[in-house]
Image: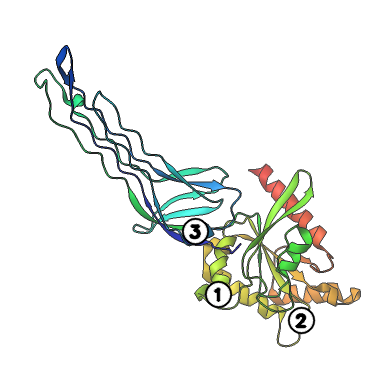
Amino acid sequence: MKFVDEAKIKVMAGNGGNGCISFLREKYRPNGGPDGGDGGDGGSIYLQADEGLNTLIDFRFKRVFKGQRALDGSGRNKTGHKGQDLTLKVPVGTEIFDIETEEMIGDLVEVGQKILVAQGGYHGLGNARFKSSVNRTPRKATRGSEGEIRELRLELKLLADVGLLGLPNAGKSSLINKVSAARPKIADYPFTTITPSLGVVSLDAHRSFVIADIPGVIEGAAEGAGLGLLFLKHLTRTGLLLHMVDVGTDDGVNDPVAAFRAIEGEVEKYGDALQGKQRWLVLNKVDLFLDEEKDQLCQDVVDKIGWQGPWFAISAITGEGTKVLVQKIMTTMEEAAEAE
């Protein structure tokens, strides 16, 4: 299924039914009085988070959604039937914006969470409502109001505990493939990953976390270069970022320090949504070095970068160091949960 993380739709709630003007005329009750019933309320439109969806592709081709109009009232004080509500299913993590005002209407972050996006029109009143001691035969009724019409922008941001950040071919897909059941495409050329993917890392029956992989970020992504800008937003919901750097191809062209600084610059340009997040450095492809060289080479990279936070040396292909990494992530998450 194609991954679509933005969509624009138009929602049109149903109009309310009109009130009725009617007078009771029966045998033995020739002057029965007004009996016009109210109209029904128009159908409203809701958006609801569904765990079975992971893309907004359903809104790519159908973009206009209408609630049902209510029926008008009728004689014998009969109220018109209410218009049926319409509930649209969207993925968990969908943000809803009003295009005209740019106001965020809601953020669906829990399975089953539901939000009203277009209110149905209210019912009109029948003439029975206007009967009084001074007006025994009212010939007045009101029309139902129009349903709300809105143009919305839906924006999906994946919900994950950990996000992977790095240049193309840094090994992000290989890592998520090694530590989870997710199977993103892996190849020896840049931009193999073209859509975000999620993987669940399970340590045991009751200890797991979700990790997100996005397409590789290149220099200039914050200004729109490459695919990075389109998908960096998916990392804004994560609690921890793993900044992956390829240390196995320092050939004068691919420099690990330059690679780190390129991504660091894009994170700063993107703003506080990413810059303020906890971030760990992950040095990948250490399997390309001899055992006696690994520690010193990795330490040299860390020193040149000037990194002060936690860092890990791994091989996403062989699995070296990945168990230590995921255990540390899980422990840190549990400690944070206990602190809260």
Quickly name the residue at label 1. Answer: 221
The part of the image, by quadrant, that contains residue 10 is bottom left
Quickly name the residue at label 3. Answer: 155
Q: Are marks 3 and 2 in contact (CB under 8 Å)?
A: no
Looking at the picture, which amino acid does disc 3 mark? Glu
Q: How many marks?
A: 3
Q: Position of residue 336 (x, y in %)?
A: 67, 48
Left or right: 19 as drawn, with respect to 216: left
Could you say which disc has been placed on residue 295 in the image? none
Quickly name the residue at label 2. Answer: 249
Q: Are marks 2 and 1 in contact (CB under 8 Å)?
A: no
Q: CA distance from mark 3 to mark 2?
A: 37 Å
Say which label, 2 or 1, has the lower sequence index.
1
Q: Compared to 85, does 242 lie above or below?
A: below
Looking at the picture, which amino acid does disc 2 mark? Thr
Q: Position of residue 319 (x, y in %)?
A: 83, 64
Say which label, 3 or 2, has the lower sequence index.
3
Nearer-the-camera pick, 64 or 169:
64
Say few, some or many: other residues with alpha carbon within 10 Å of mark 2 (under 14 / 14 to 19 / 20 or more).
few
Q: Are marks 3 and 1 in contact (CB under 8 Å)?
A: no
Q: At 64% from the left edge and 72% from the top edge, which residue is drawn?
A: 216
User: Which image quarter is the N terminus in?
Assistant: bottom right
